[in-house]
Amino acid sequence: MVKPNMVSLEAPKRANRDGALYVSLGDLVKNALRMTPDRIIVGEIRDSIAANAFLEVINTGHSGVMTTLHADSIYDSTSRLQDLVSRTANMNYEMISKSVYRNVHVLIHCEKTARFGKRVVGVGEIRGDQIVSLFSFDYVNDQHIEHSESIESSLLIEACKKSGVESWLW
């Protein structure tokens, strides 16, 4: 789909038999940064090169950056990103952790379940050096639970209340 003011960059899914150069997700992110975008949506982070590219993007001051990553929960997602970055970065784990916690703001965990299909099962917000759970999914009662102890005038919670949590269900 072609939209005005939008550029879509995609890496080949497999190597070219003619010996063409390999294009990584990191290469695509670097080229996207040269286009001075307002928003960058990085595809799924599967390896350390892509994780490093994502960390580079969020450290350049771009506020509209989004990506996907495989993890078991909102709490595991930050350590998964840190582990991937630490494989190739020339920074120690503590520096990587500070960079992630300073630049990532919202975590949304989706899960594919037999009974409910694909569902948002956790939403968290990074505040300082900790992850605060805003919503979780109660499988027994088939509903999202708002964690009232974590409400501190969060813009995310206000947006959820206005739109209705039901709109999050996929």
Image (cartoon, rainbow, N blue to C red):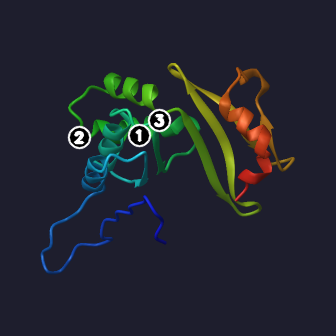
Labels 2 and 3: the sequence-earlier one: 3
The amino acid beneath tag 2 is Thr
Q: Which of 151 and 35 is in front in this view?
A: 35
Q: Answer with the quarter of the image where residue 98 lies.
A: top left
Q: Residue 128 carries which label?
A: none
| Residue at (45, 36) in percent of width and height | 63
* Residue 139 appears in view: yes
Residue type pointed to by label 3:
Thr
Considering the numbered disc 3 on the image, is that residue within a helix, a strand or a loop? helix
Residue at left offset 73%, top offset 55%: 169
Q: Distance between the residues labelled 2 and 3?
A: 17 Å
Quarter containing the C terminus: bottom right
Q: Which residue lies furthest to the right in this view?
A: 141
Q: Residue placed at 74% from the left, 33% from the top?
A: 158
Could you say which quadrant of the image residue 155 lies in?
top right
Name the foreground residue: 26 vs 155.
155
Q: Where is residue 153 in the image (x, y as percent from the top left)?
A: 71, 22
Residue, far front: 4
- Does the residue at mark 1 contact the one at mark 3 (Cβ under 8 Å)? yes
- Up the image or down, 89 lies above or below 40; here it is above
| Residue 106 found in image quarter | top right
User: Which of the labelled discs sits on residue 78, or is there none?
Assistant: 3
Q: Which mark is residue 81?
A: 1
| Residue 75 at x, y percent in the picture | 56, 34
Residue 88: give its label.
2
* SS type, badge 2: loop
Q: What residue type is labelled 1?
A: Leu
CA distance for labels 1 and 2: 12 Å
